[in-house]
Amino acid sequence: MNAAVRVIMDMPEPPRPRPRAGDWRTASDAELVAHILARYHAAHRAQLPELIRLARRVEQVHGDREDCPAGLADHLEAMAQALESHMRKEEAVLFPLILRGQGALAAMPMAVMRAEHDGHGAELRRLEALAGGFITPPGACASWQALCQGLRVFRDDLAAHIEIENDVLFARFAPAQAH
């Protein structure tokens, strides 16, 4: 765990009852930030290196197949870099503001994070296209099957991550502007 995450996790807030599973609108700011860090930031950091490794392997072994997801590993690497940069900004700037009770001052950073979330959504759509809809083709090896399964989990996790930040955490301080 990096130093910024440790600092964020250690910031005190009065204890409150844990929200029921999935009911994060009733959670305190500290509970919600801790959940995002543990459930999503940590998960993405664990998922992406393995997905990149699997994608490289599938591309290397099955590159001669027409249905091989060519370019998938490079796309995942670019997504990993963009997502890491995004999460670091949240951990270093946005979440500490919120946890110090200064979330109302964070409207501009939240707007930037929302715009980046839109970009992540577009990259997820490209990822799904590159990976053939995350459907394992007939005769796919175990690595390819694991890759497709892992990509589905990653897609679902990132979509849920974006939703909880945009619709629950950020909405507390900076309601989204209509486009």
Image: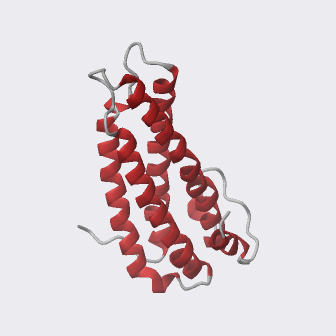
Image-quadrant location for residue 50: top right
> Which residue reaches farthest right?
15
Seen from the viewer's position, the closer of residues 144 and 87 is: 144
Quadrant of the rendering where the C terminus is positioned: bottom left
The spot of residue 38 in percent (x, y) is 64, 57
The spot of residue 62 in percent (x, y) is 37, 23
Tell me how many marks there are. 0
Seen from the viewer's position, the closer of residues 20 and 141 is: 141
When the figure is inspected, residue 57 is found, relative to residue 45, above or below; the finding is above
Quadrant of the rendering where the N terminus is positioned: bottom right
Image-quadrant location for residue 15: bottom right
Residue shown at the point (45%, 37%) measured from the top left? 151
Seen from the viewer's position, the closer of residues 176 and 94 is: 94
Residue shown at the point (60%, 67%) measured from the top left? 33
Q: How is the image coloured?
A: secondary structure
Residue shown at the point (38%, 61%) measured from the top left? 117
| Residue 175 in sight | no
When the figure is inspected, residue 153 is found, relative to residue 80, above or below; the finding is above
Residue shown at the point (71%, 77%) measured from the top left? 11
The spot of residue 76 in percent (x, y) is 40, 46
In the rendered view, does 77 fall on the left or right side of 20? left
| Residue 41 in sight | yes
Seen from the viewer's position, the closer of residues 60 and 18 is: 60
> Which residue reaches farthest left?
179
